[in-house]
Image (cartoon, rainbow, N blue to C red):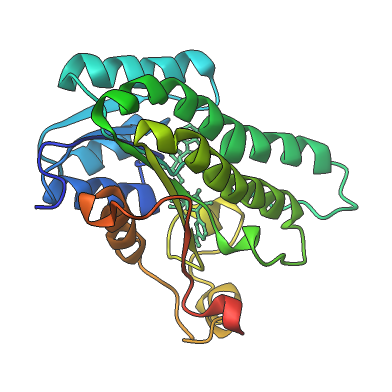
Amino acid sequence: MSLLNKVAIVTGSSSGIGAAIAIKFSEEGAKVTIVGRNKEKLNNVAKKLGDHLVLTADVTKEEDAQRIINETVKKFGQLDILVNNAGIATIAKFEDDNLMTVFDDIMKLNIRSVVYLSHIARPHLVKTKGNIVNVSGVAGIKPFANGFTSLAVSKAALDHFTRSVALELAPNGIRVNAVSPGPVYSDIFENMGVNKEDESGFYESMRQSTALKRISDPEEVAHLVTFLASDKAKAITGTISVCDNGLLLS
Ligand code: NDP
C-alpha cells in the first residue's frame, strides 16, 4: 500500500474526481479527510472509506479552510498530503453581463482557496515532509472558445502557482505537483448546464476533441494523483502531469 498511514485532505471529494481520489487513497492505506458542501454526498463517499473524517465546508471561506486543517490534525495528529481538487467550470462568454461575477467566483474557488489552504497547511507539511497535488485542467494549457476564458485563466494560474510554490517549498522537503485532466465523466458538466443524457451532443463532441476519442473515468485521474502523492514520486516536484486522452495533441 503506497500511502500506508499517511494523512490526507482531499477537497471537493463529495463527487467525481475528488471522491475517486479519496477512495483510492483509502485503498492505499491513507487516513482521509473528505471535504465538500453537500453532507449527503460526502456521507455516501464515506461509506467506501476506511479511517476517515467527513467535513462539511466551503473552501472559499478562510474560517472553513482553517477548520479543515485544524480538525484533520486534531483527529489524525499530522498532515502528509493536501489535494486541492474542488473546482468549478461555469461558462460565461466574454460579452455576457455576468462575466465578472463568474470570473470572481471561479478565481475565488479554483485558485484563491488553493493558495490559502496550501499556505495554512504548510507548517504541518514541513513536519512530515509532505506534498501537495493540485487538480488543474487542460484549459490552463490550451484555451477553448465559447465562454471558458475564466476557467482557462484560473487553471493557468494554478499551474504556475504549482511550479512557483514547488520552488519555494523545496528547501522544506515539500513537493508540489498538479494533474491536468482532459474530459472526465463527473457532475461538473451537469453543473455547467449540460444534459446528462445528451450523449450524441456535448459528450460526443468532447470525445471527438481527443486523439483517443474517449472521456476518462474519475478513477484514471485518481491513479495518477495517488502516484504523485506517494513516495514513489519522491523525485517529482513542480510538474503538471497531463492525462487528457490526447486532447492537447489534436
Ligand atoms: P464535480 O463537480 O464532480 O466535483 C467538484 C467538487 O468540488 C464537488 O465535490 C463539490 O462538492 C466541490 N466543491 C465545489 N465548490 C466547493 C466549495 N466552495 N467548497 C468545497 N467544495 C466545493 O467535478 P469534477 O470531479 O470533474 O472536478 C474536480 C476537479 O477536476 C475540478 O477542479 C475541475 O476543474 C477539474 N477538472 C475536471 C475535468 C472534467 O472533465 N470533469 C477536466 C479538467 C479538470 P460540493 O458541491 O459538495 O461542495
Nearest to the observer: residue 43 or residue 36 = 36
Q: Is residue 248 visible?
A: yes
Residue 109 percent location from the top left of the image: 58, 35
Identify the residue at horizontal 58%, vertical 41% (top origin): 110
As drawn, the residue found furthest toward the right would be 95
- Position of 134 compared to 193: left or right? left
Q: Residue drawn at (26%, 45%), measured in percent from left and top?
A: 22
Return the x and y of residue 238 as percentages of the image width and height.
48, 50
Residue at horizontal 48 percent and vertical 42 percent from the top:
166
**89 above or below 66?**
below
Front-lying residue, 186 or 108: 108
Above/below status of 172 relative to 193: above
Give me the residue at 29% from left, 48% from top: 229
Is residue 206 visible to us here?
Answer: no
Q: Quadrant of residue 65?
A: top left
Residue 117: x percent and y percent? 47, 27
How far from the left and from the top, in percent, is residue 211?
53, 86
Q: In the rendered view, tell whether residue 72 sits above or below residue 174.
A: above
Q: Is residue 64 left or right of residue 91?
A: left
